[in-house]
Image: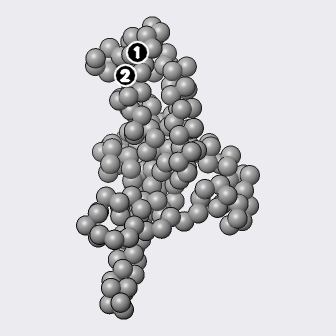
Amino acid sequence: MDEHTAISSARSGDQRAFAWLIGSYKHMVFTVCCRVLRHREDAEEATQDVFVKAYRNLSTYQGEARFSTWLYSIAYRTALSKLRARQAGTTGLDGLQAAGLEPQQAPEGDRTDRKALVEWALSQLPAEDAAVMTFFYLEELGIEEIVTITGLGESNVKVKLHRARKKLLTVLQDHLKEETWTLHVD
């Protein structure tokens, strides 16, 4: 089944076609929600919410943008709404830890596990920066698509990407300095 056929069939009520769409996009939708929310259970809940919203609003998808762009926009905005609601109910470091926002530990062991290190480094960035980096580098979306998804202006997306790259570099350099220092001291 191709995407266009699945969308048309899902609009007509074919739940298998919509299940095919979910299967095609569930990993990336979950990744976007994780990048923003940084809490697995919240991201799982948000992912479900995204697909419910997508199903209910499938008739509004006009095909002007790619389906993935439309769906990622729902994911990004749903996750941001959930994050803002969660943050409104938390205060101080104890509240952030209770909400699942405590700092993650850098991966230990084999430095060749670059993917784990990059995932960890992305988790150290602010949620919006991590999401924009994910869209651009991991999902390989263009600036215009990211603008559509996030609702940010083109120049704002470019600035966010530039600053996020610099932050990511700093996080990785700091981690590698600590790791090198530990190796020399031991």
At numbered mark 2, what does the secondary structure look like: helix, strand or loop?
Answer: helix
Disc number for residue 16: 1
**Residue 100 versus residue 149: which sits nearer the camera?**
100
Q: Amino acid at mark 1?
A: Arg
Residue at (66, 60) in percent of width and height:
96
Colour theme: one colour
Q: Is residue 155 above or below residue 63?
A: below
State the CA–CA distance, disc 2 to disc 1: 6 Å
Q: Which residue appears at 32% of the width and 17% of the height?
A: 4
Residue at left offset 50%, top offset 28%: 51
Q: Quadrant of residue 143?
A: top left
Q: Mark 2 near mark 1, Cβ–Cβ under 8 Å?
A: yes
Q: Amino acid at mark 2?
A: Trp
Residue reaching furthest to the bottom: 185
Identify whether 90 is placed above or below 53: below
The residue shown at (29%, 70%) is 111
Instruction: Pick whichever, 164 or 83, lies toward us.
Output: 83
Residue 149, above or below 170: above
Whole-percent x and y of residue 142? 32, 43
Residue 85: x and y, percent? 68, 46
- Residue tagged by mark 2? 20
Q: Is residue 96 left or right of residue 186?
A: right
